[in-house]
Amino acid sequence: MYDDELFYSAIARYHIRSGNLFTQNTLIDLYNSPYMSLSIFLPGNMDVVIKNMTIGSTYTSEYIINNHTLFPFYTAFSTKSLTYKLFAKMKGEVSGNTYAQIGAISGKIKLNKYFKFCPKCLKEDIDKYGETYWHRIHQTPGVLVCPKHKILLQNSTVRSKLNRHGYLVDASEKNCIIKRNTEKSLYTDKEVDILYSIAKDIEYIYNNRIDKREVEWYQDNYINYLIRDNFASFNKYVNHKKLCDGINGYYGKLILENLNCNISNSDNNWLTRITQKNKFSDSTIHNILLIKFLNISLDSFLKSKYSYTLFKNGIGPCLNTKENHYMKYSSHISGIIYNCKRGTVAQEFTCQICNFKYAIKGNKSDIRNFTNQEYENLTNTLINTLKDNNLKICYSEKEYMKNNGINDNFENLKKKHREIWTNYQIKYPEKSKSEISRENIATYKWLFNHDLEWLNNNSPKIRKPKCDYGKVDWNLRDEETLKKLYVVVSNILTSKERPQRITLYKLSYECNLPYLTNKNLNKLPRTSKYLEDILETKEDAKLRKIKWAIKEIINSDIEKLGLYNVYVKAGIRCPSKLDKEKIIALIEEYRGTKNIIKV
């Protein structure tokens, strides 16, 4: 087999040179069975093929699977267990469909409809070997550019999806017809560079052995990189909207569509599956797209786990979002809070530029898995370090608040928000508590969280709604309802469209009178009497439809007046024998004769 040749291509070349007329003969030679189901990209029963090879052959099942199938591509980011199951099925140790096994790996990536080829590779193969073959890298989903020549791949005339006993077709100049400048303007130079780099990453997967890891390892690694690039918070919450917009902007709609990697607006897209906890690994092409977007080399991502630390050598970032140096490392340790009862240590950081202060607090397990003695030694070391640098030390949270004037600030804020709330009540004396809160949400939230008792005692009282709807003049309503019903019923009866059954709900909807269907109908005697006379049963409505249909047919073409045409025009099902007699009587009445022409 040639370098990077697809195993299917080798079988197709053998089929031509063996002189076999039918595919079944070749299958018997290789698999000992004419009923073997062919698989182009993930062939099975490799052990049987190896046994049927000529004596002295150095090929093994492992070599062919790793170097002449798409197995390395599909299992690059899969777990050890899934990889072993797929490998065992391809060797033939375990029965089953290999494509069913990769259902959890492929991530719903569609295979190419046709075999692809590179025009320059085609010429080089013919010059070197006297023939060409199907290259494995060119048939891999996600490869649209040749990684060797950096030109767009072209479709051959050979379909890559075969039936159960599909024909074996080798690559040749007849089915690999080079098209000149057909896709020259399809991609920009920048997009071609992106597709080329994707193809090079897939080539790296084929040429290197990838260590298998659990799904959680990849997810944690992605989260750390997303935190680094501000697509996720420090508590590992991913901003999926921002991330989706970034991916769409980086690759563009054209590339994502042609790679079958569109990102929908729903929460169940491939980008969400990769970054959230999921027991299944996703497609290799999906992982490559995310890795390239995060500006990481595939080699460094797969070989080592990235750990993002917020603090470096005692220096932390400034968390003041209103300043331009936000997240720049300009904050130094300026204090420590140690709570013996709770077992917490909090370090205070102060920005050297804007004096913004914040504290990072954690318990023993958050710092590290220290023993009690190691934890005390760590605390003493921090305290001594602060003393040597003339920094403030607080031994309790209360003392920290007292030394930093937090209590005074709290009282000032309380006084400020109380005044604002009181002034709003004076300004809007008729508004309720919820209406005033909408005028100043910040003040309401602060009082609700820190001064709830005062807020409840100094807010407008709950007002009971006034329910004075007045008395209804039922005689007047009876008269008005009757007038509306007259108009609506008249419109229904004189309509030229197919008649509709007159029901109580129909009249209530047409007149916009919902009280027709409730218990108050007994207070409208004239309306009730009129409804009893006008409402139709199913039979009444059917009879009116039939009369209408007979008149319509007579007006258009009296020769077509027959039972079947009446049924169709009226829109009714085939009636019973008794109904047929009634319809025939009506037809005779309208036609004035007893000779019925049945159409």
Image (cartoon, helix red, strand yellow):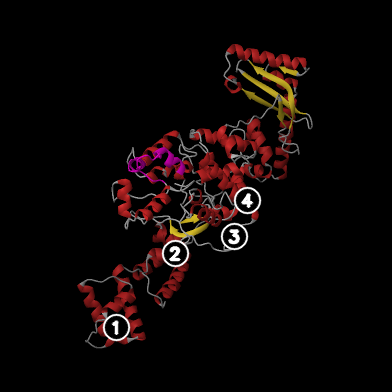
* Disc on the earlier residue, 1 or 4: 4
Residue under numbered circle 1: 561
Residue 591 falls left or right of residue 277: left
Residue for point 63% across, 13% down: 376
Report the disc number at residue 400. none
Q: Alpha carbon of mark 2 to alpha carbon of mark 4: how far? A: 63 Å
What's the residue type where badge 3 is placed?
Leu
Residue occupying the far bottom of the picture: 592
Q: Circle 4 is placed at which residue position?
A: 193
**What residue is drawn where x is 61% and y is 39%?**
297
The percent coordinates of residue 561 (x first, y second) are: 29, 83
Which mark is nearer the camera, 2 or 3?
3
> In what element is the residue under mark 2?
helix
Q: Which mark is residue 186?
A: 3
- Classify residue 420 by image quadrant: top right
The magenta-colored residue range is 42-67
Could you tell me which secondary element the residue under label 3 belongs to? loop
**What element does badge 1 sit on?**
loop
- Which residue in the structure is indicated by mark 2? 509
Q: Is residue 451 visible?
A: no
Check disc 2: other Cα within 10 Å, few if <14, some if 14-19, many if 20+: few
Amino acid identity at mark 1: Leu
Task: Give the residue drawn at x 59%, y 60%.
Answer: 186
